Image: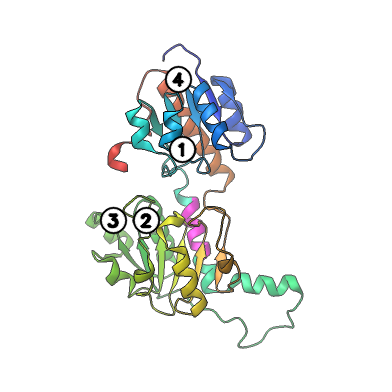
């Protein structure tokens, strides 16, 4: 659409520099508050916009896309994940979908390492003691955790974030193992000193820490199901900074409560903000509110990618971060 000022609807509040630049470039409708749009409001937004800028909190299904009309031409998602959008249906209706990959790789890997340390060293328990005023002083056997140096880390999904986590874990002296849809190039394996497992079951049963770093797709839903979780060693822990749907949350909760898994560090949850209340009660679990990409720098860079995708589309070209069928 060269030469035409596109109408853009943004569903949530974004960092101020991003909102300002969007207003400079497009006929943009910014969110007045930071509450998620209702289903009806989303459909209405799609009917009046050339471009919709949603986030992970905006579920866009087949029925909504069918009701959107013919004006919408691009869904420029603010975020790397796109499993909340029915991409196939969108493409069938002539609506392109773009995302923001690669921007928060380092931030998410930092959070994965932070959760790993928090769980194994029982940091939240120590923090709770200090905040409650119960701490009576140092004791030789108090709040003993585990040393991570020398432990085996099994990374499920060795893409950008998995590899970034591996580099951090190597610096802490951990042994790197991974399972991936495709084996990495030998040079990358050598750099990371990483051991590949074709069988996820075999890897899971031997690791001290499992880190989930794969996207949510139909093939990865409950990839860590009850059967596979039972393969984990009783003293192992699991960390998830990717997508909650990859782990069977109810099964994980049962096993943590029973002491069949030593601990978990979770930044994402199977049902979004509806976290299993039994999970909240456990001392061997660290829960965070989806903070993996929550850095000022990362969130602004995400917005810059959204703008580039829209601007490229407005100039009549293919958005650089177009979601294509091979990615689904």
- Is 217 drawn above or below residue 314 in the view shown? below
- Is 252 drawn above or below residue 92 in the view shown? below
- Which residue position holds label 3? 188
Rendered-image quadrant of the N terminus: top left
- Is 265 drawn above or below residue 57 in the view shown? below
Q: Which residues are magenta?
A: 107-115
Q: Residue at x 27, y 59 (%)?
A: 189
Mark 4 neighbour class, 10 Å CA radius: few under 14, some 14 to 19, many 20 or more: some
Q: Does label 3 or label 1 sit earlier along the sequence?
A: 1
Inspect this view and state whether residue 309 appears: no
Q: Nearer the viewer, residue 95 or 76?
A: 95
- Which residue position holds label 4? 71
| Place of residue 20 in the rendered image (x, y in percent of width and height, measured from the top left) | 61, 27
Among the 4 quarters of the image, the one containing residue 102? top left
Give the Cα separation between the discs numbered 4 and 1.
Answer: 16 Å
Question: Do callouts 3 and 1 mark residues in contact (Cβ within 8 Å)?
Answer: no
| Place of residue 207 in the rendered image (x, y in percent of width and height, measured from the top left) | 36, 73
Mark 3 secondary-structure assignment: helix
């Amino acid at each position: 659409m060269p030469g035409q000022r596109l109408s853009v609807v943004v569903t949530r509040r974004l960092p101020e520099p991003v909102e300002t630049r969007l207003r400079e470039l497009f006929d943009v409708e910014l969110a007045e508050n930071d509450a998620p749009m209702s289903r009806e409001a989303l459909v209405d937004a799609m009917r009046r916009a050339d471009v919709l800028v949603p986030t992970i909190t905006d579920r866009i299904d087949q029925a909504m896309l069918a009701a959107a009309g013919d004006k919408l031409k691009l869904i420029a998602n603010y975020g790397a994940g796109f499993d909340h959008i029915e991409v196939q249906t969108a493409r069938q209706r002539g609506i392109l979908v773009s995302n923001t990959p690669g921007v928060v790789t380092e931030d998410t890997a930092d959070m994965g390492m932070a959760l790993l340390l928090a769980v194994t060293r029982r940091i939240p328990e120590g923090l709770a003691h200090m905040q409650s005023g119960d701490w009576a002083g140092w004791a030789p056997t108090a709040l003993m955790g585990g040393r991570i140096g020398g432990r085996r880390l099994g990374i499920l999904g060795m893409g950008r974030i998995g590899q970034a986590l591996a580099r951090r874990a190597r610096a802490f002296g951990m042994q790197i193992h991974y399972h991936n849809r495709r084996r990495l190039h030998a040079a990358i394996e050598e750099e990371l000193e990483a051991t590949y497992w074709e069988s996820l079951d075999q890897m899971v049963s031997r690791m001290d820490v499992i880190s989930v770093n794969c996207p949510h797709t139909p093939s990865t839903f409950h990839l860590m199901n009850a059967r596979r979780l039972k393969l984990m060693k009783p003293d192992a822990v699991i960390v998830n900074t990717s997508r909650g749907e990859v782990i069977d949350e109810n099964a994980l909760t049962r096993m943590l409560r029973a002491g069949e898994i030593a601990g978990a560090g979770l930044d994402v949850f199977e049902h979004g903000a509806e976290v299993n209340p039994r999970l909240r009660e456990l001392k061997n679990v660290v829960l965070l509110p989806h903070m993996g990409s929550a850095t000022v720098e990362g969130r602004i860079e995400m917005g810059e990618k959204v703008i580039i995708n829209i601007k490229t589309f407005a100039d009549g070209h293919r958005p650089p971060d177009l979601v294509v069928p091979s990615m689904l």
